[in-house]
Amino acid sequence: MNKIRIGQGFDVHRLVSGRPLLIGGVKIEFNLGLDGHSDADVLLHAIMDALLGAAGLPDIGQQFPPTDQKYKDADSAELLKGVHAMVRAAGWDRIENIDATIMAERPRMNPHVEAMKKRVAELLAIETDRINIKATTCEQLGFVGREEGIAAMAVCLIGSSG
């Protein structure tokens, strides 16, 4: 009997000077970066929480606590690989698809979406056609609209034949 589960994730980080901007495992040239204990990659964090949620596992804050210096400036791409291993160890052998949205006023995300899809697919060892990444602004409303931060949300469908 095939089993499937859906998961959703959300993440947000403040924009600050003096940090690189990494989103979806892709470095984006910009005068600000995202503040966080790790590299603060909001897209990969949202995807990780979606995968963990679908597998019924604790969220990334529990898996990689910000109080643990081991994760200070951690590469979220490596953390995503670790999450993928956790999901597989929990008995979920397939990522059917991921659908994600990045919310940012600036910089424009659309020019980087294909590179992000390729990077996420590479990290999860799945085909790029199983990943959809969209970008939107918040029409100058809220913290994203005021360019104080960037947010991302993701949903995923995982499966198991066991």
Image (spheres, rainbow, N blue to C red):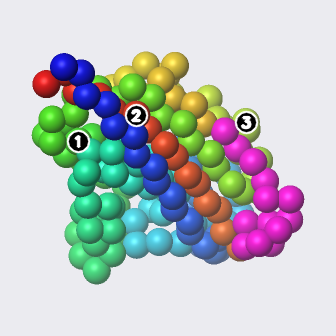
Of labels 1 and 3, the one closer to you: 1
Give the residue drawn at x 15%, y 42%.
90
Which residue corresponds to mark 3? 111
Look at discs 2 and 1 and give the one toward the viewer.
Answer: 2
Residue 139 magenta-drawn? yes
Which image quarter holds the C terminus? top left
| Residue indicated by mark 1 | 87
Mark 2 and mark 1 lie on one chain; the one further toward the N terminus is 1
Residue pictured at 39% horizontal, 54% vertical = 49
What is the crowding at mark 2: few (fewer than 14 residues within 10 Å), some, or many (at least 20)?
A: many
Identify the secondary structure beneath mark 3. helix
**Identity of the amino acid at label 3?**
Pro
Compared across the picture, whether 84 is left or right of 49 comes to left
| Residue 86, picture quadrant | top left
Between discs 1 and 3, the one toward the N terminus: 1
Looking at the rendering, in which quadrant would you find the N terminus?
top left
Residue visible at 56% across and 68% down? 13
Residue type pointed to by label 2: Leu
SS type, badge 1: helix
Furthest residue in direction bottom, as rendered:
67
State which region is magenta.
134-147
Q: Are marks 2 and 3 in contact (CB under 8 Å)?
A: no
The residue carrying mark 2 is: 157
Residue appearing at x 57%, y 31% in the figure: 132
- Camera-side residue of 151 and 1: 1
Can you say whether 54 is above or below 66 in the image? above
Left or right, 115 with respect to 142, comes to left
Instruction: Report x, y in % for residue 74.
Output: 34, 61
